[in-house]
Amino acid sequence: MKASVLDQSPVTEHGSPAESLSNTIDLAKLCDRTGYTRYWLAEHHGSRPFASPAPEIMTTRVASATERIIVGPGGVLLSHYHPLKVAEQFHVLEALFPGRIHLGIGRAPGANGGGSRALRPDIDQAGPNGFQVRLTELQALMGQAEFPADHPYRQLHIMPTVDRTPPIWLLGTSPTSAKLAGALGLRYIFGHFGSPGHTRTAINSYHEHFRPNEHVPAPQAAVGVGVYCADTTEQAHHVFSTQLLFRHRMNRNQLDPIPAPETALPLLADIPEDGDTTPNPARSDYEWPRYFVGDPDQVSRALTDMTGELGVDEIVVLSTIYDHAARLRSYELLAKALGLGT
């Protein structure tokens, strides 16, 4: 199994956004050394818990700080941007880091309504197919599809010229996004941590609707998973406590920075664990729990079982952990348990 990383550059209650961005570089270096395949950088706007609204800039910084790992945005929120500008940015990145850049595309707004309209004032007039139109235009501008003969962008020349353009992945949390990725012949990442009730349906839909092409001759899918790994089960649940409280608050539209365990644990004592937040498969409301929490053996076995059931060979790991050292340790332990880089 391959494993990649999704880094949201989380901001902690006692930290700063600048520190979060520095931690991203630190984590990327560790993941580069320990055998992770791809390093995805999230895009969020006006969100206090997450530090980076500009994953294309962070892609440049992370690629510069690492040697081997593939780097890219996870993902560019294409509804806000013109496909030409995105294509130009990623031609530049490919020229600077040949073969090491991938392009993740997201459908979500990544901002509240006011933020979305500030980024793109006409977003309310985009229409139901606006995202798909932009995505197919981006494919063509990246040389991974053809414009119709009468399309006004057909004669555009994208600079700088490159030998190959970064592979495009569509990111999503619904069977709708999976169907679109398959129909357009794109690679696909399903965010199980965001929508665990639709994981099997989405992956099946992607395979069912996949149309092979010269750039992606066979379906290529990965599953995004929330992982909280530590040397012992007790330690894993300790670091997981911050995510439990964060999600409880998020479900109530309270977007605060990531709390410390010392903040979370007393408050969680008064909040009943439910089937949505439990790491225990026996208590989960879903086929697989939203989060995978435990020691390296427990977590790696659960993830291997899940990917085997789904028929995918790659996970994308998201670990929102308050303590930076514990976060590094979680990724390090998982890499060793999965045999990455061996």
Image (cartoon, rainbow, N blue to C red):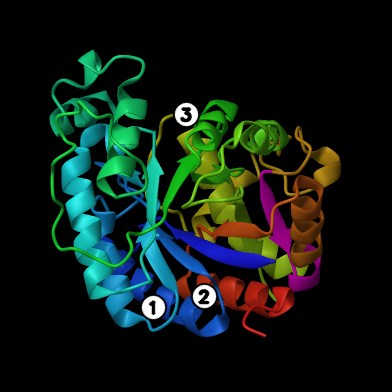
Which of disc 3 and disc 2 is earlier in sequence?
A: 3
For the residues labelled 3 and 1, say whether their Cβ atoms are less than 8 Å apart: no
In terms of secondary structure, where does tag 1 sit? helix
Of residue 50 and residue 178, the one placed in the foreground of this image is: 178
Residue kind at label 2, given as amino acid type: Leu
Nearest the viewer among 117 and 262 is: 117
Q: Is residue 172 left or right of residue 270?
A: left
Residue for badge 1: 26
Q: Nearer the viewer, mark 2 or mark 3?
A: 2
Q: Which numbered dot is residue 328?
A: 2
Q: Are marks 2 and 3 in contact (CB under 8 Å)?
A: no
Q: Nearer the viewer, residue 161 or 315?
A: 161
The amino acid on which the numbered mark 3 sits, given as a three-letter code, is Arg
Pick the quarter of the image with the C terminus: bottom right
Instruction: Give percent across and percent down for residue 237.
Output: 68, 60
Secondary structure state at the residue bearing disc 2: helix
Q: Residues within 10 Å of mark 1 (few under 14, many from 20)?
A: some
Decide: is 334 above or below 214: below
Name which residue type carries label 1: Asp
The answer to whether one can see residue 119 in this image is yes
- Point out the stretch of residues depicted in magenta: 290-298
Disc 3 is placed on an element classified as loop
Q: Are marks 2 and 1 in contact (CB under 8 Å)?
A: yes
Q: CA distance from mark 2 to mark 1?
A: 9 Å
Visible in this render: residue 256? Answer: no
Q: Residue, x 20% and y 25% (percent of image)?
A: 150
